[in-house]
Image (spheres, rainbow, N blue to C red):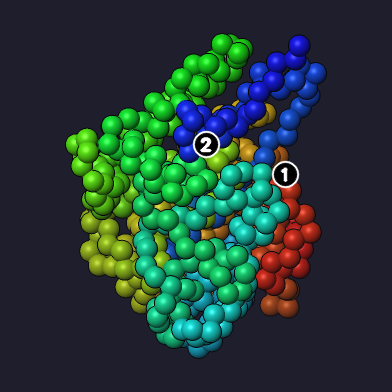
Amino acid sequence: MKRTFSRRLLLGGSATLFGLPFLESALPRDARAQSTPAPVRLVYVFLPNGLDMATFRPTTVGADYALPPMFTGLDALKADFSIVTGLENFNARPDMAGDHASGVSGFITCAHANKSETDIKLGISADQVAAQKIGIATRLPSLQLGIDGGGGTGNCDSGYSCAYARNISWSDAQTPLPKIVDPYLAFNQLFEGFDPNASAAEAAKRLAYEKSVIDFVIADVNGLTPKLGATDKVKLDQYLTGVRELEKRVAGTGPGAGCAPGTPPVKGAKLDFPTHLKTMFDLIALSFACDATRIVTLMLGNAVSGRTYPFLDITGGHHDISHHMNDPANIAKLAKIGAWEMQQLGYFFDKLKTTPDLVDGQNVLHNSAVFCSSDISDGNRHNHDDMPIVLAGHGGGKLHPGQHISFTPKAKTDPKQKVSNLLVTMLDAAGVTGAQLGDSTGLLAGL
């Protein structure tokens, strides 16, 4: 008799549905020898207020380029990401003032926002093009995360609605998808069940008895373990350990933190920015490891972000600093913020690289494509050409990182290459072929 069981198990008789890692033992015997292609995950990371291009841009092109100052310390990951310069996002330009809101709205829609507080019109974003095509493969078609919240109404930048300034994910021209900024809520979104009422009950029960969600399913896991081979037992143990460790961290920062049994949940204390960001990166890595979703957006801030960086010994708000007016002191601060952001991206890339992809034996970064950029290029000029772009991951072998790729026109008469074509190329790597996004015209060669 062939021994088979579902990869997705409803565990513990509760509403908690876990997407388990790929287990070879779960396949019919005649299918185990067949190669299973791993899915390509897509991540879009938004950095506010532009970057210091002088320390971002390498001085040479190709695979032998030297890492520029902003990427100091990322040598071990150099082969896993490319620096891309010279691409423009023409549709992100505003009508008169409002470069930040129009740049945020055009970040991965590459569409031109209708300047209004109420008459919202934009376009679908790259992540949602992917979600509509391949998102059905996972419980969550996509996940929208962020650090700073805020509503979508009102004027956030020179007449542009806050909907444009605070969202990069759009399911259609009128519908922004709000982001989750609380890691605890993000964890529940990933690992609680389909029924929102049941999810709330499960969370309350877990808090009341100070038990991990793992404790509710351990009996089923114990029943599953004897059916697994030695390799799959190790995979399952690694997976459950990762879930438990992350849940311990998240449970200490969200509603119910430090509550005694029976105490009603309360909103958790605000996390400091570095911890908040790392927790979100960890959540993304875990969501990919367990195949809860394959498409994620993350905003490190909203348009016109005035975040302060006291942990970098920097005074002043980020947006004000980005209007550097060629002041060397402000430029140095902007470069320091950018270098810190690249270090955080390095942490994320390393997290994905050290997360095994249990489908094909590669790592998750190999089977991902990560787009990192901003609403504008230089904060002083507010320009939307020569956008600062980091493209990480190998796209399952379809992308070739480890380069500085410059698309800067060699002559004034040469056509400018588009951010939208890079985003379409990422989609193609993930199996979304023939996509059209904003002003895209086709795939971008050389990536």
Residue wearing tag 2: 17
Say whether residue 180 is left or right of residue 413: left
Q: In the rendered structure, which amino acid carries the disc numbered 1?
A: Lys
**Residue contact at pointers 1 and 2, CB within 8 angstroms:** no
Label 1 SS: loop
Q: In the rendered image, which quarter contains the N terminus?
A: top right
Say whether residue 133 is left or right of residue 392: right
Residue pictured at 50% horizontal, 21% vertical: 221
Q: In the rendered structure, which amino acid carries the disc numbered 2?
A: Leu
Residue wearing tag 1: 398
**Residue 260 falls in image quadrant:** top left
**Residue 181 falls in image quadrant:** bottom left
Relative height, residue 46 to residue 102 (above, below): above
Coordinates of residue 360 in the picture (x, y in percent): 67, 28
Coordinates of residue 100 in the picture (x, y in percent): 45, 74
**Residue 315 falls in image quadrant:** bottom left
Coordinates of residue 106 in the picture (x, y in percent): 56, 71
Q: Earlier in the sequence, mark 1 or mark 2?
A: 2
Closer-to-camera residue (324/397) = 397
The reply to whether residue 297 is visible in this rendering is: yes
